[in-house]
Every structure is written in C-alpha cells, then in structure tokens.
Image: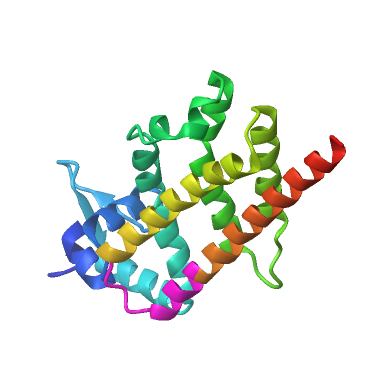
Amino acid sequence: MAGEWLSLSEVASMLGVHPSTVRSWSDQGHLPAHRTQGGHRRFRRREVELWIQSHREDGLDEGHLVVQAALKNIRVKVSEGRLESEGWYEKMDEDARNQYRRSGRALLQGLLESLAAEGEYDNSEARSLGFEYASRGWRQGLTAAEASLAFLFFRNVLLDAMLTVYEESTIQTPKAWSDIFRKIYRFTDQIQITLLETYDAYQRGNH
C-alpha cells in the first residue's frame, strides 16, 4: 500500500521532534522500527499512529521518553573534559573520580524513576542520591560548599541536556514540558537539601 512505510525524517515531522530523537527512541526500543536490506530505518505508518495515540494521551509519558533522549547528551557533556577544570575534582583520588564520572547517569536514572512513579511523590531516591554525594565528598575531604559544587555540576549537565532536547523539539504538549521541569527542580532540590543535612550531621558528629 502506497505510503505505508515512513522514513526517519518523516516520522520526526509527524512527532514534532528532531530526527536524532526518533533515532534514539528506536535504538532504545521505544518506537517500533524496521530495517531495509540496506540497513536503513523504516517505520510502518499504522504503528507510528498507534504509538502517537498511546503516548499523546498522557503528556508525562511523552516527556519521560524525551528525558531518556537526553542520556546521550549527558554522556557527551561529561566526557568533554569539563570535569578537569573543576577545583573540587582535582582533590579526588582516581576511584572517586570514576564514581563522579558516573554521577550524571545515576542522576538521570534516578530522575527517570521519579518521573515513572505513580501516586504520591516519593523522595527516597533523591534523598539516597543526596546522601551519596555527601558521604563521597566527606570521605574525599571536600567542604560542604565543594560537595555542593560537585552536585551542581552534574545537575547543570542534566539541565543543559534537557534544554538541548527541548530546543530541538516541536512537541505541542507544553504541559508535559512544564511537568518535567518542575519534577527536575523538585528532585534535585531534595538532593541538595539532603546533601547539606548530611554534611551538617557529619560536622556535628566531629564535635
């Protein structure tokens, strides 16, 4: 049937997102795709229409997929050598540096779980990450301010990655985006609060 198969750019136009976002979604298995003998992606129109219907019914689910598309951006930004210019990073031993390099992914994964959670907001994952940042910084001799800078570095990488996806997207669901960014701030604010509370407890224990 004529028009049954769509190219990657045609699907991107239908969904209102950048082609790289469609590529990421298909690579992660979220959007059904087929391959030609030459290895090119092709999408069945009916499958895409069903996908749109199921995900546009719930803007948060759509936003959840967009957050997943930011994962690649986070890996790129963390590997650009930006860490080496951070004063707190210079104080780390190699093991701690390796842990901090993985912090961006852990932060995003925790946010994804927060977005996927239904019902009343559960801040346990954010509090767990806040404790992790604090205990790691304390072991490495960082001050509370330096540990906060370490966390803010990765939070800003996350926000930059999300803004990049947002700027490339033309999804007409502003509520999804506003919900996503509100959740990001609520989630990361809780991490920061827990980090400072944990440092305060450590310092009181030393007196």
**In which quadrant is the C terminus drawn?**
top right
Residue drawn at 47 percent across, 45 percent down: 153
Judge by depth and name the residue closer to the eye, 160 or 68.
160
**In which quadrant is the N terminus drawn?**
bottom left
Residue 72 located left or right of residue 96: left
Residue 145 visible (yes or no): yes
The colour mode here is rainbow
- Residue 20, image x and y in percent? 25, 53
Residue 106 visible (yes or no): no
Residue drawn at 60 percent across, 41 percent down: 147
Is 27 drawn above or below residue 47 in the view shown?
above
Is 79 drawn above or below residue 70 in the view shown?
above
Is 160 drawn above or below residue 63 in the view shown?
above
- Residue 139, image x and y in percent? 69, 28
Residue 107 located left or right of residue 162: right
Residue 102 located left or right of residue 135: left
Residue 189 located left or right of residue 138: left
Snapshot quadrant of residue 93: top right
Residue, far left:
2
Snapshot quadrant of residue 136: top right
Count of marks overlaid on the render: 0
Residue, far front:
207
Q: Main secondary structure of the magenta part?
A: helix
Queried whether the magenta region covers residue 86, the answer comes back as no
- Residue 102, image x and y in percent? 51, 35
Residue drawn at 17 percent across, 42 percent down: 37
Judge by depth and name the residue closer to the eye, 96 or 15.
96
Look at the image and give the residue range highlighted in magenta: 169-181
- Residue 54, image x and y in percent? 44, 74
